[in-house]
Image (tube, grey):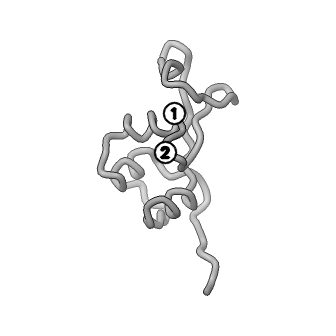
Amino acid sequence: MSEQEFHPGSVPVAVAARVYGKDASWVRAGIVSGWLPIGKATRNGKLVTSINEIDSRYGRINFYISPKLLYEETGFLWKGEKR
């Protein structure tokens, strides 16, 4: 059995939302809260782990969604497409 190769970089939140059949805000909330183990949320280099921290007044949150973790959770193989 060969090792699966994954596209480098982050899966867009919109793509992950489509895979789950949910809204992008559901994916963001799940990553921040920790119940959706497919990536990380950071602001200014610091991990965001509380729903209370999702407030635009504090600055932009960057989301990294791992292609490998998304594949392990859903079976969806992201190949770099945006939508």
Report the side of 45 relative to 74 (left or right): right
Q: Residue at x 46, y 38 (%)?
A: 30
Residue bearing mark 2: 36
**Three-letter code, disc 2:** Leu
* Residue 45, above or below 8: above
44 or 4, which lies in front? Answer: 4
* Residue 57, above or below 65: above
Quarter of the figure that contains the N terminus:
bottom right
**Three-letter code, disc 1:** Ser
Question: Which dot marks residue 55?
Answer: none
How far is disc 1 from disc 2 in space, using C-alphas? 8 Å
Q: Position of residue 47 (x, y in %)?
A: 65, 31
Report the side of 12 relative to 18 (left or right): right
Residue bearing mark 1: 33
Q: Position of residue 5 (x, y in %)?
A: 60, 72
Q: Position of residue 37 (x, y in %)?
A: 54, 47
Q: Position of residue 8 (x, y in %)?
A: 61, 59
